[in-house]
């Protein structure tokens, strides 16, 4: 059955807005684990708008489930990952002015650099995933650079107008099928919530969902542990 990665970035966003020490993303990570999360996901952005460097080792010490560190493919982030050695690194595109990640990593246009980058992380026994758009070109490029898994960007489906949603869902389906055929571990994420995740349940090739903002938003109403449990129920 599919696994749930709970992204705790926006717990840290609330903390950083006031530059206080609460809410604590480390506590959120532990409670998410206790409420059924299979993985904790967090994005250490170059601008440090939410998760901070010091959060990572504290989260690693607090949980017994894997930590999935999302990060840009930069020398600074590579050194950070090698030093702290999370179980998984997911490489994502990053722009300073964006509200959130706007699309998948363009692996196909950066093959040589990413092949070396991925190789250095894998030498340290770190599982490397690439966050990519649901296209044949990007999936095949991900195989060429030696990634262990791909996370398929679901944002286009989530943002699509009603008449376009079947087309965007089919793109994710075809991408997941190809990725699975090529031997990838297949994850999906971005923009998923308690309603729009339901159509993805028919895509049995998806083995993991990474979801954050909608869980944090729902937790404001129903509480953190219940919000995680309810999403876990939908995923499973």
Image (cartoon, grey):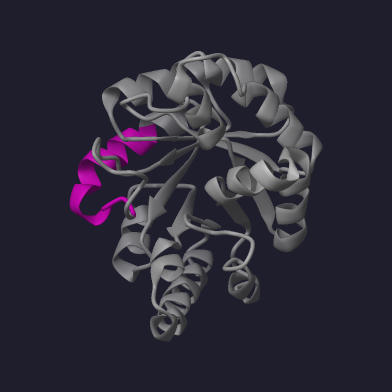
Magenta residues span 104-119
Closer to the camera, 60 or 211?
Answer: 211
Confirm whether the magenta stretch covers residue 110: yes
195 is higher (above) or lower (below) than 70: below
Give the residue at x 60% y 25%. Answer: 25
What is the x, y in percent for residue 99? 33, 44
Give the residue at x 76% y 54%. Answer: 230
Residue 86 visible at all: yes
Give the residue at x 67% y 30%. Answer: 29
Q: Quadrant of the C terminus?
A: bottom right
Q: Quadrant of residue 133?
A: bottom left
What is the x, y in percent for residue 79? 37, 19
Residue at the left extreme, as displayed: 109
By secondary structure, the bulk of the magenta-drawn segment is best described as: helix
In screen coordinates, is 139 left or right of 110? right
Confirm whether the magenta stretch covers residue 92: no
Give the residue at x 49% y 47%. Answer: 148
Q: Quadrant of the N terminus?
A: bottom right
What is the x, y in percent for residue 186? 54, 58
Closer to the camera, 60 or 233?
Answer: 233
For the image shown, how many numbered marks are present on the structure?
0
């Amino acid at each position: 059955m599919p696994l749930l990665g709970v992204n705790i970035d926006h717990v840290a966003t609330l903390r950083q807005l006031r530059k206080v020490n609460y809410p604590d993303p480390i506590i959120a990570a532990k409670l998410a684990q206790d409420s059924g999360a299979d993985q904790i996901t967090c994005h250490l952005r170059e601008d440090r708008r939410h998760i901070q460097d010091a959060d990572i080792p504290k989260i690693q010490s607090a949980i017994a489930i894997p930590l999935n560190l999302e990060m840009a493919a930069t020398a600074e982030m590579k050194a950070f990952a090698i030093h702290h050695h999370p179980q998984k690194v997911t490489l994502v595109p990053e722009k300073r002015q964006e509200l959130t990640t706007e699309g998948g990593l363009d692996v196909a246009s950066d093959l040589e650099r990413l092949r070396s980058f991925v190789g250095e992380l894998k030498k340290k026994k770190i599982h490397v995933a690439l966050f990519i758009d649901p296209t044949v070109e990007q999936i095949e490029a991900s195989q060429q650079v030696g990634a262990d898994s791909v996370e398929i960007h679901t944002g286009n489906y989530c943002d699509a107008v009603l008449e376009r949603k079947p087309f965007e869902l089919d793109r994710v389906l075809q991408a997941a099928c190809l990725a699975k055929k090529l031997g990838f571990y297949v994850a999906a994420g971005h923009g998923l919530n308690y309603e729009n995740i339901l159509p993805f349940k028919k895509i049995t090739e998806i083995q993991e969902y990474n979801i954050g903002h909608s869980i944090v938003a729902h937790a404001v109403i129903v509480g953190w542990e219940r919000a995680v449990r309810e999403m876990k129920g939908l995923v499973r």
